Image: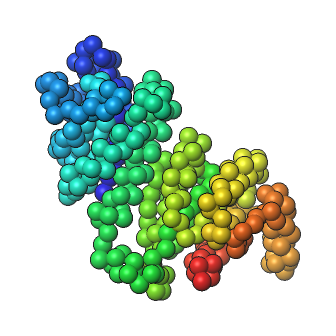
Amino acid sequence: MIQNIFLFKGNLENKFQDLKDLNIYCYPDDIINSNEKILVNKIIKEYNQGESNNSQNSNHIIISKPVAQFIKNLNMYTACINNIIIIGLIFDEEDNPYDYKETFEELMYEFINIETDYSFDDEIEVDNLLISMFIDIRRFGDEVIEKSPEIENFYQKDSFYKIFLFGLDEVGKSSLVRRLKTGRYAENYFSPTKKFNIEYIQEKEKLFSVWDMPGQKVFRSKWLKGIQDSNIIIFMMDLANQRRFDESKKEFWNVINHPELKEIPLLIIGNKIDLFNYSKENDGEQLNTLKSEISNNFSFDKIRNREWVFLFTSVKTNFNIDNVLSTITHLLS
């Protein structure tokens, strides 16, 4: 399974010979930096020995054939573009990088095409390239290369469902997935997640593939790449951070308004209800009042062409967590 992706951008004239002129980008973790000179030089050495094994597309972009490299316990698969860019994938040690050859090459040609005015000088575009390729390669690995017999069995029985989980950063998405899968919660276990992730959760006769998307602004344009073929959508918000309600509402409707997503069931989760003080005698009435206020604020009454449910949760205290999976099952029935 892919763990990281990186990109080296060097100087056209010296072809990476001077590391001071080398820019390094990584996603999701900064696993390589220019201080690791031995590692970096071994990676780029492959591409300082000439320009053999290259292919060229119609826009005169030269892309080398990918090369497997195992350096300092890193199982890598790298390719060079126009002799100034190196893109590398880092896999688990037991993986065979050549299983990903065709997909890796197709993605490079798809994303790095001069007709789309792609620029390696724009850091945001580079970040988006790495995120996009990471998501597509992870999806390919998860659904094609590494599909276990157990998962295949659920596929055959039509009991396999994809859940797309999105929302702003720091609302508790990854903590929710961990709570659902393991029953555990750890204070400060997660910093705001930068990594797109897939987790599998079995609920009785069903297997859920939960796609947990990072919520920082730079990643939101890629949400729709992960939402394809989803059976249910989960939107999660932080009830205690009202300063971000407008931002959260905007991102919610940006996704839900896409016509190709109509009729997909929706679960809306208002998390961190534990931060509100309610009396036990009137908690039902108070929760209903809060639910009405939140629904009005987010215009949930305008949701059309789908079944949807709103739930309050506290991932921290485990409040209403049992109802999350049962509600998902209900929405899928």
Residue lying furthest top:
13
Q: Quadrant of the C terminus?
A: bottom right
Residue 121 rendering spot, x and y as whole percentages: 45, 23
Q: How many marks?
A: 0
Residue 107 rendering spot, x and y as whole percentages: 36, 44
Can you see residue 291?
Answer: yes
Q: Residue at x 41, y 33 (%)?
A: 113
Could you say which quadrant of the image residue 154 lies in? bottom left
Q: Is residue 118 left or right of residue 287?
A: left
Residue 100 rendering spot, x and y as whole percentages: 26, 52
Q: Depth check: 293 or 60 in front?
A: 60
Q: Depth check: 331 or 53 in front?
A: 53
Could you say which quadrant of the image residue 331 lies in? bottom right
Q: Is residue 144 left or right of residue 189?
A: left
Q: Depth check: 139 or 1 in front?
A: 139
Q: Depth check: 135 or 167 in front?
A: 135
Q: Residue at x 39, y 48 (%)?
A: 134
Q: Quadrant of the N terminus?
A: bottom left
